[in-house]
Image: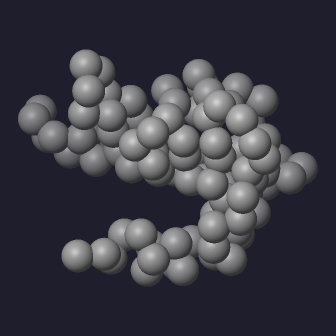
Amino acid sequence: MTCSASSTCSPIVNRGSYSDDVTSVNDREFPDREFIAIAPAGTGDHWGFPVTDGRCQDEVWFHFHDAGNPELETADFLEFIARHGLRS
């Protein structure tokens, strides 16, 4: 979703040589849709929701891009926003 010609409102934006929105990141990284990325960690890793039976769970998990199992980050999205989105 683009807010104006010069800014993007997508939660996932890579400020490197190209920009990614939520759809393109999930199409590329999680095509099976067992995980829906909502925010980048800046290292190729993502925070997002696990998907069970086609439905996003309430928990936010941290998904490592290179190895390891995803780890539970917060019990729900509001807690995730309070922990990561409201930092000053």
- Name the spot of residue 69 as percent of width and height, x first: 78, 47
Residue 33 location, quadrant: top right
Task: Pinpoint residue 49: horizontal percent, then vertical percent.
Answer: 67, 55
Which image quarter is the C terminus in?
Answer: bottom left
Residue 28: image quadrant is top right
Q: Is residue 58 left or right of residue 16?
A: right
Residue at x 77%, y 30% (from the top left corner): 32
Say whether residue 12 is visible.
no
Across and down, in percent, residue 45 comes to 54, 41
In the drawing, does residue 86 fall left or right of residue 6? right
Residue 70 in the image, given as x and y percentages of width and height: 73, 51
Point out the residue furthest to the left here: 6
Q: Total number of numbered labels?
A: 0
| Side of 87 where 42 appears, left or right | right
Q: Residue at x 31, y 75 (%)?
A: 87
Residue found farthest to the front: 67
Q: Residue at x 45, y 77 (%)?
A: 83
Q: Residue at x 52, y 72 (%)?
A: 80
Residue 41's place in the image compared with 58, above or below, is above
- Using the image, determine if residue 76 lies above or below residue 63: below
